[in-house]
Every structure is written in C-alpha cells, then in structure tokens.
Amino acid sequence: MRAFVSSLICLLIGYIGIRSITLLTTKIKEFETIKGHSLATGLFVGGFFVYAGLVVYGSMVNPFFLSQSVTIGSYFNLQRLLVVIISFFVSLFFGGLFYYIFAKLKPFGVDLDDVNKQPVSIGVFLFCYEVFLGLIMLASLTLPIG
C-alpha cells in the first residue's frame, strides 16, 4: 500500500510535468498534432509506461511512508517528498532551458520547432521527456537522505 500511494503521487507529478512541458514549449503543439496518429500516440503512451515503471520501482525501493500504515505524521517521509518535488521543478527548469537553447539559440543550426512538421517527431519528443522526467524521479526516490 505504501508503494502504491507513493507511485500515485509520482504519477500525478508526471501528469503535471507533461502538462507543464506543453506550456513551456509554446510553438510545439503536442497533443493537437499527435491526436489521430497511431505511431506518435504509441510513443507518447510508451514513454508514460517507461515513466510509470521508473517511479513504481523507485516507490517500491523507497516509499514516502516509513511505517506499514499510510498515515500523515511522524511516519511520513517529508524529506523524500520534498526531494521529489524539488527534482520535479529542476526537471521543468532544465526542460525549459533545453527548449530555449535548442529552439532559440540553435547551437547546432537545427530549429527545434521543426518537430511540428511530423506527428512522430512530437511523439519522440514527448517520449524522451517522459524518460528524462522518469530518470530524475527515480534518482530522487532512491537518493540516500540523512
């Protein structure tokens, strides 16, 4: 039960992360473009499965709850939750920073907004962000504290 509740909290954070990245990448129309395209949608859903697997594993190893019961209080690991939330904001910061660097500064001469031309490109973009966020969440869940 402890890992289940921890996983649900992390999955909610992932949902918020995906919604937030769509707000940060204003010139990329993620969900409007992949809608109706099976491969792009499959990549998006597959990325979320990878994300879910990473956070479920991290929650099994180190859940937010320290006792066998799911109660808020001295048995709830607020430090762990705080690390996860801070890691989430760090991932948003780096996601926005990478978008700015690749879309605005074009260090490699590539326009990131070109992913709008193909739905599969957006599916790959979302897949990669979900894996990126999942790895950050896994690290924050398994990071030794104390």
Image: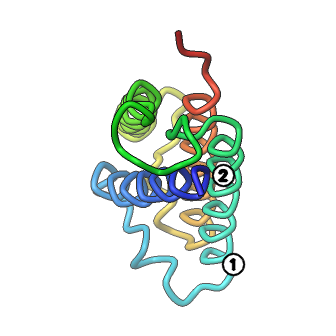
Q: Quadrant of residue 106?
A: top left
Query: Label 2 amino acid?
Result: Val
Which numbered dot is residue 89?
none
* Residue hosting label 2: 56
- Where does residue 108 sit, x and y in percent of width and height? 55, 30
Q: Tell me, yes or no, if residue 84 can be seen here.
A: yes
Name the foreground residue: 41 vs 140.
140
Q: Nearer the viewer, residue 32 or 64?
A: 64
Q: Which residue is mark 1?
A: 39
Q: Residues within 10 Å of mark 2 (few under 14, many from 20)?
A: many
Question: Could you say which quadrant of the image residue 58 lies in?
Answer: top right
- Which residue is pictured at 47% across the width and 29% down the height? 80
Which mark lies nearer to you, 2 or 1? 2
Distance of label 2 from label 1 (alpha carbons): 25 Å
Picture quarter containing residue 66?
Answer: top right
Q: Are marks 2 and 1 in contact (CB under 8 Å)?
A: no
Task: Give the total of numbered labels.
Answer: 2
Q: Nearer the viewer, residue 59 or 66?
A: 66
Residue appearing at x 40%, y 41% in the figure: 103
